[in-house]
Amino acid sequence: MSRPLCATSHPLRIGESLSDLLRLLRGDHRRDSQVDALEHRFAKALGAASAVSAPMARMALDLILGSNALRPGDKILLSPANIPEMRAIVELRGLVPVYADFTPGSIFPDPVRVRDLAASGVRAFLLTIVAGQGGDLAEIRRICDQHGILLILDATQAVGGRFQGRPLHQFAHFSFFSTCEFKWVHGYRGALVLSDSEERLASLRTHARRSHPDFQRTGPLLRKWFSDSLICLVLLSLRKGSWIPLLTRFLRAAVFTQDPLAPPERSGVRVGPFRFLQSDFERMKTAVPQDMRFRLSDFEAIAALRSLRRLGQRITRHQEIARRYDAAFGPMRLLPARPSGFESTFWRYPLLFKDPRAGDRFLEGMRDRGIFVERSGLSLLPEDAGSAPEARSVMARTILLPCHEGLSDADCERVVQSALSILVDPARPELK
Ligand SMILES: Cc1ncc(COP(=O)(O)O)c(C=O)c1O
């Protein structure tokens, strides 16, 4: 039987984790030297002058909002797709979210709607690029400049993307990129922020230092290293993609009991024989622990630096796979609209079905064939809101195909042939 194909390649490899540890023990012991190096090299790789790191992307958003004096009651425009923690950050700051609906048939906010909403006293716009598929960023920036709106780009899924030949961060006041597991550049967690202005970035750095504690503890991070390596070993032996999130949480909770970025007094909750992080339970409520260190730790930076070295190679492979998928699925009219001028690096490869049922059946059919396709899982929309109906509909109809450097040409062919066998199945006319 052929091996199951995962939706994502697992970024942590035991040999590499070991070499991270050795580098940390051997290395230059000037505190923060690795974080400085990561900020510098990440900026260089993306064509920027400098970068500021944060312990998580949600924290980067919180710092950006705080350093730009957004006040309770201010309106903020949100593209409706992101992790729910981003809405929690916005609400915890007392900001009022307004949703910018998608252009029909695409996964990007409609500039016409953005223009209408911008005139209603909006102070900031959190724009998310889903699966690396963007839109007309120049038009969005023009609208924001006309109305004095701070444009913040969550470009986590779009590292290396370009619009009209320019890197994406040049279109926004701030852009941030999560470096948590499974992302383009991955440490154990973290984020990097770029800006179109060095002064803006410098004031973000000053604000971060002033508003958050400064400490760096290696002990808990080493425990985290140990748990991640253990997880990795189990995953490699199982090779079961659908188990990854479950096992990750379970094993990590069992092995280490403290949030490695928080001061020593934060402790976990005991359930049976295991301890769970308080933050796991409170994640949705508090979204970001206020006592986190203002930037990454050296240990996390070492892992992110290692993954950064492979970035170019990863991007090339994602784009090769996307070209193969384009040839197979383009003629079937299953692709979301892609605006001209946007060069995607294809974080994932989205297919857009005509209704959610068709998407469900496709998902089941692919999983029956051992291929773990996914739904996007990103939604900021409150259940009760009637706003952004197009985004709601598009997100319910979008299925993401695996697109990562762990796929060989033969794997890629298997994805295509399995998908086609479902899509052209005469017993399932509703999928066409
Ligand atoms: C669009 C987007 N933003 C942010 C994140 C992660 O944010 P954080 O670093 O706060 O966990 C993810 C990852 O799941 C994401 O897909």
Image: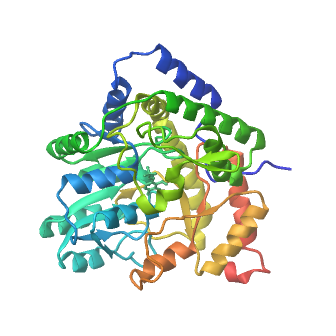
Give the side of residue 406 with respect to residue 238, left or right.
left
The residue drawn where x is 44% and y is 63% is 285
Q: Is residue 331 above or below residue 171?
A: below
Q: Is residue 311 above or below residue 58?
A: above
- Residue 6, percent from left and from top: 67, 51
Q: Residue furthest bottom?
A: 386
Q: From the image, which quarter does the C terminus lie in? A: bottom right
User: In which quarter of the view is residue 113 placed?
Assistant: bottom left
User: In which quarter of the view is residue 339 placed?
Assistant: bottom left
Q: Is residue 328 above or below residue 203?
A: below
The quadrant of the picture showing ligand 1 is bottom left
Give the side of residue 394 with respect to residue 124, left or right.
right
Protein image colouring: rainbow
- Residue 236, percent from left and from top: 72, 38
- Residue 403, percent from left and from top: 58, 52
Q: Is residue 222 above or below residue 48?
A: above
Looking at this view, is 346 or 226 the one in front?
A: 226
User: In which quarter of the view is residue 370 placed?
Assistant: bottom right
- Residue 167, percent from left and from top: 31, 48
The residue drawn where x is 54% and y is 29% is 222
Inspect this view and state whether residue 212 appears.
yes
Looking at this view, is 372 or 407 the one in front?
A: 372
